[in-house]
Image (spheres, rainbow, N blue to C red):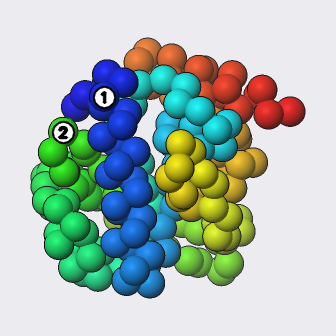
């Protein structure tokens, strides 16, 4: 996927259209990952390979019904467990499914749910370059970025993202 400045413009347009389609269908969703960092700090901090979105697993079919008319094509992979993918042009959206369990937000995987957040994600909206989007809570995002992942490329993104979020203090 594109990582040029033009790619960022295309990704932001996709975020806006995805949000409008899901909001219009009453489907809760939240940005996480690098784009959520950018929405929190109010600027595009780095190139992004994709757009990470979380949504309720129970809305799987409604998501497809909302996104396909908005120009998003479902492109699942055999390796998808608690996620799926959509593409629009050069923009890839990775959609991670979540569920509620005893008040916590969990990722429902076959070996047992993984707790992502002990509390609901909420409905805070942030704006970036005229685009409005819901994001996971700042503290949850900051906590996830504070421990770089193992793979070198992912770790470098996490370090950059955490540094950007640290400027908010």
- Residue 166 vs 10, above or below: the answer is above
Name which quarter of the figure residue 45 lies in: top right
Gap in angstroms between the C-alphas marked 2 and 1: 11 Å
Q: Which residue is mark 2?
A: 90
Quadrant, the C terminus: top right
Residue 43 position within the rendered picture, expressed as x and y whole percent measured from the top left = 59, 33
- Residue 138 vs 134, above or below: the answer is above
Tell me what residue is drawn at x 22 percent, y 73 percent.
Answer: 64
Between 104 and 55, the one lying in front of the other is 55
Name the element at disc 1: helix
Name the element at disc 2: loop
Choose mark 2 or mark 1, whichever is in front: 1
Residue 144 visible in the snapshot: no
* Left or right side of 4 for 86: left
* Left or right side of 123 for 31: left
Q: Residues within 10 Å of mark 2 (few under 14, many from 20)?
A: some
- Residue 96 vs 42, above or below: the answer is below
Tell me what residue is drawn at x 63 percent, y 61 percent.
Answer: 125
* Left or right side of 60 for 144: right
* Left or right side of 60 for 148: right
Q: Which residue is mark 1?
A: 6
Name which quarter of the figure residue 141 lies in: top right
Quadrant, the N terminus: top left
Total count of labels:
2
Between 160 and 167, the one lying in front of the other is 167
């Amino acid at each position: 996927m594109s990582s040029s400045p033009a790619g960022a413009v295309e990704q932001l347009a996709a975020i806006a259209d995805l949000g409008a389609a899901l909001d219009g269908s009453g489907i809760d969703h939240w940005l996480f990952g690098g784009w959520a960092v950018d929405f929190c700090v109010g600027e595009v901090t780095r190139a992004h390979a994709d757009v990470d979105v979380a949504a309720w697993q129970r809305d799987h079919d409604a998501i497809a019904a909302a996104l396909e008319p908005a120009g998003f094509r479902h492109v699942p992979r055999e390796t998808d467990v608690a996620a799926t993918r959509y593409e629009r042009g050069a923009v890839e959206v990775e959609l991670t499914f979540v569920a509620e369990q005893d008040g916590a937000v969990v990722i429902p995987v076959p070996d047992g749910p993984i707790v992502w957040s002990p509390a609901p994600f909420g409905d805070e909206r942030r704006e970036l370059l005229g685009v409005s989007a819901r994001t996971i809570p700042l503290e949850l995002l900051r906590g996830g970025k504070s421990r770089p992942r193992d793979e070198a490329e992912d770790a470098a993104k996490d370090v950059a993202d955490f540094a950007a979020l640290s400027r908010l203090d």
